[in-house]
Image (cartoon, helix red, strand yellow):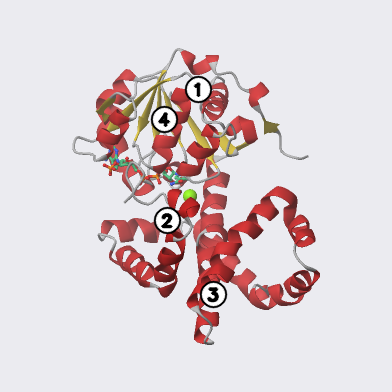
């Protein structure tokens, strides 16, 4: 049976209208949830640590900001929107001691609960509302009257009201405008990690960079390679999102379509799928999370090196110049404009 897709008519904002909603963290997801819920007429407060640089931004954008423990004390529903690797510590120190019966704890990704970094408290509803898009898009789509599809999950042992709260929250952030599907913490976590690693972030960046390098190494102008392998990708993906892969193929030339059929599988093939299966396995067994936790505890040496290498790649220098010539792209560059871009 196809999954039930919840829309605006299935969710009732009144369920959380009289409640205080605390969002802990005001970064990519946090600012989007906070602003969308507020614009939906709900009562939102922000919880942050003492010296957080996000606090001034949240205040400027019209929110009352408290230290996390106090925000939890004041709130009925508490969403943890701090980075996954920091959640356990914040939870132990500031959330759990103030999590009295009747409160709801909410997540926007299942990792901490699914892999046991946080043990779900007993007698407390634990829910997830996970928009399937970056925080800045969750906000910009909402402002445009649209919405990013979202997933909800209700952890075992929660009351029967928990789902109504999750659906109301999903409506408040704009998710039910697009469609909301119910899942589990496990399914959301594993598919989310897989998607971002193999396809959306890891797969797509590696594909773009390999294409760019291939053209540049063959002596073509980097600017040409940039337009061809990076800029135009969005235009093609927009067609896929609007009309499916066949719809995209309908729009491109016959020559492009023929090349798609015969050359696509030369790049992504049985071997790539084998690699994807290995990636999925590492996610399912917890190996990925275990290594990521270790890297975090070690002070992120590899992570920092990856960032530096990425920023120094030729495609970034080329892109910076070309994007500066396209004011509409430049205007939307989120780097530096957001609450707490790290
Ligand atoms: P982020 O952009 O890095 O923002 C983290 C926020 O948490 C910042 O405001 C930061 O403040 C604050 N913070 C850090 N340590 C804190 C502490 N000890 N106590 C209170 N606040 C603290 O994080 P994010 O990417 O939104 O990720 C948050 C959650 O959303 C994660 O579970 C992630 O998996 C999930 N998620 C994210 C996206 C996305 O689009 N990024 C998409 C789906 C799900 P400072 O600025 O002061 O450091
Ligand atoms: Mg993710």
**Quadrant hosting residue 229:** bottom right
Q: Which mark is residue 289?
A: 2
Seen from the viewer's position, the closer of residues 328 and 122 is: 328
Question: Which secondary structure lies at badge 2?
Answer: helix
Q: CA distance from mark 2 to mark 1?
A: 35 Å
Left or right? Give the position of 105 relative to 147.
left
* Residue at horizontal 48 percent and vertical 57 percent from the top: 326
The mark nearer the N terminus, 3 or 4, is 4
Is the CB of the residue bearing disc 1 within 8 angstroms of ligand 1?
no
The mark nearer the N terminus, 2 or 1, is 1
Q: Name the spot of residue 176 as percent of width and height, x first.
A: 61, 30
The mark nearer the N terminus, 2 or 4, is 4
Question: Which secondary structure lies at badge 1?
Answer: loop
* Residue at horizontal 59 percent and vertical 58 percent from the top: 234
Are the residues at dot 3 and dot 1 in contact (C-beta closer than 8 Å)?
no
**Quadrant hosting residue 132:** top right
For the image shown, how many numbered marks are present on the structure? 4
The extreme bottom residue here reads 218
Seen from the viewer's position, the closer of residues 160 and 309 is: 309
Left or right? Give the position of 46 relative to 32.
left
Note whether residue 129 is visible: yes
Q: Which mark is residue 40?
A: 1
Note whether residue 154 is visible: no
Q: Which mark is residue 34?
A: 4
* The N terminus, quarter of image: top right
Q: Which residue is mark 3?
A: 225
Q: Can you say whether 266 is above or below 201 in the image?
A: below
Q: CA distance from mark 2 to mark 3?
A: 35 Å
The mark nearer the N terminus, 4 or 1, is 4
The crowding category of the residue bearing disc 4, from other C-alpha atoms within 10 Å (few below 14, some 14 to 19, many at least 20), is many
């Amino acid at each position: 049976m196809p999954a039930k897709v919840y829309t605006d008519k299935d969710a009732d904002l009144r369920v959380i209208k009289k409640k205080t909603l605390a969002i802990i963290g005001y970064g990519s997801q946090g600012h989007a949830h906070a602003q969308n819920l507020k614009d939906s007429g709900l009562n939102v407060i922000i919880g942050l640590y003492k010296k957080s640089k996000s606090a001034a931004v949240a205040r400027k954008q019209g929110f009352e900001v408290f230290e996390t423990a106090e925000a939890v004390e004041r709130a009925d529903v508490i969403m943890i929107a701090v980075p996954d690797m920091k959640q356990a510590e914040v939870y132990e120190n500031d959330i759990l001691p103030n999590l009295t019966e009747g409160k709801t704890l909410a997540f926007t990704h299942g990792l901490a609960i699914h892999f046991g970094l946080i043990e779900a408290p007993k007698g407390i509803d634990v829910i997830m509302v996970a928009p399937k898009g970056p925080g800045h898009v969750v906000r910009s789509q909402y402002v445009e009257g649209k919405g990013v599809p979202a997933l909800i999950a209700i952890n075992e042992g929660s009351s029967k009201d928990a789902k109504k709260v999750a659906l109301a929250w999903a409506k408040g952030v704009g998710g039910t405008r697009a469609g909301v599907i119910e899942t589990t913490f496990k399914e959301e976590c594993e598919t989310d990690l897989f998607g971002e690693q193999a396809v959306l972030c890891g797969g797509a960046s590696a594909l773009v960079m390999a294409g760019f390098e291939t053209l540049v190494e063959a002596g073509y102008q980097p600017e040409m390679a940039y337009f061809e392998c990076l800029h135009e990708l969005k235009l093609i993906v927009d067609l896929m999102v609007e009309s499916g892969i066949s719809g995209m193929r309908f729009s491109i030339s016959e020559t492009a379509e023929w090349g798609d059929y015969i050359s696509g599988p030369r790049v992504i093939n049985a071997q790539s799928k084998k690699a994807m299966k290995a990636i999925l396995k590492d996610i399912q067994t917890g190996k990925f999370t275990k290594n990521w936790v270790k890297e975090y505890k070690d002070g992120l040496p590899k992570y920092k090196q990856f960032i530096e290498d990425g920023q120094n790649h030729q495609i970034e220098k080329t892109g910076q110049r070309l994007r500066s010539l396209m004011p509409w792209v430049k205007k939307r560059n989120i780097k530096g404009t957001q609450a707490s871009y790290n």
